Image (tube, rainbow, N blue to C red):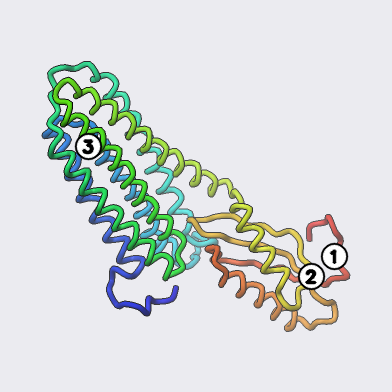
Amino acid sequence: MKPDRHTHSCLSTPRGVTWLSVVVNLALSAAKVAAGILCNSQTIIADGVHSLSDLVTDAAVLAGLRVSGKPADADHHYGHMRFTTLVSMFVGAALVATAAWIAVKGILTLREADRAVSATAPFWIAVASIAVKEGMYRQTARVGRRAGDVSVVANAWHHRSDAWTSVAAAAGLAAVAVGGPGWAFIDHVTAVVLASFLGVIGAKILYESGGELVDRAPDARTQAAIEAVIATTDGVRGYHTVRARRIGGKVVVDIHIHVSPDLTVREGHDVASLVTRRLLECEHGIVEVVVHVEPEDDVHEGILA
């Protein structure tokens, strides 16, 4: 990963901006949950729990930069990138369970008349959250694009999704503040709506993590880009059995290429190295490439070598 040449600030590195994200998310979550408890607002509590959802990708990015980046060892011949997947699945399940709890609680307490909601403080916290999370989105996306790290860019979008739910929370709290006690039920309704957002995020994390565990291939655009790189590499006369899978948010590729039977072993190896280098340099998060070299006249279509 190339260092950022534009600035020496630690906040302009993937690790630095991700740790800033951890601090911001923890601070916002604590403020929202505390305000929700003190002001009897389920909406701001739900928004606070939603802020914690960004910690899922924060943890995944940090794990990817540290744990999953460790080299293979005697116990993990293929490296450590699966640890990120396991952590994501656990937290995704926790998010779904939390969303269900918030939704059920909001529905069961909908008719409770003795829980007056004080919406003013929660409203301003939600408004502040919108500005903070949008700022985090822009900084994180900028760092991710400069570093060429797709996981950091994806993490930025979680900041923006949190800003969107804070907009919904602020709207619901504004209605409660303007309408008075008779409108307190909106706090419960908004909490249920935000719980649904949280549940969707948790379910998406589970789906994506589960896909990695069963070796689901990357999207069609990524697969097409991989094949385009192979087909346009000098020395490659054909290819087959292109396989790709995601591990820890990254892509691992296994391919068979055809080369001239007149090449020496060294020349065939050089072609394979060129294919590997070009795939690693393309902008699709590829971190590992295995190339099988076959002489063109020994290839039988439809038969895996």
Looking at the rendered image, the quarter that the C terminus falls into is bottom right
Determine the residue positioned at 17% across, 35% down.
36
Residue kind at label 1, given as amino acid type = Val
SS at mark 2 in the image: strand
Element at label 3: helix
Q: Are marks 2 and 1 in contact (CB under 8 Å)?
A: yes
State the image coordinates of residue 173 (x, y, percent, origin top left). Answer: 21, 34
| Residue denoted by label 2 | 258
Element under disc 1:
loop
Badge 3 or badge 2: first in the primary sequence:
3
Instruction: Give how far across and how far down residue 149 sits, in percent.
Output: 45, 65
Q: Which of the two labelled residues, at mark 2 and mark 1, occupies the earlier sequence position? A: 2
- Relative to 281, is 169 on the left or the right? left
Quadrant of the image occupied by residue 3: bottom left
- Image quarter for residue 252? bottom right
Depth order, front residue of 102/287: 102
Q: Name the spot of residue 201 as percent of width and height, x first.
A: 41, 41
Which residue has dot 3 on it?
44
User: For the point 76% across and 78% down, which residue is it?
Assistant: 235
Q: Is residue 140 above or below residue 131?
A: below
The mark lying in front, picked from 3 and 1, is 3
Crowdedness near tag 2: few (<14), some (14–19) or many (≥20) residues, C-alpha within 10 Å:
many
| Residue kind at label 3, given as amino acid type | Ile
Q: How crowded is the residue under tag 3: few (<14 C-alpha within 10 Å), some, or many (20+)? A: many
Which labelled disc corresponds to residue 299? 1
Q: Which is nearer the N-term, disc 3 or disc 1?
A: 3
Q: Which is closer to the viewer, label 3 or label 2?
A: 3
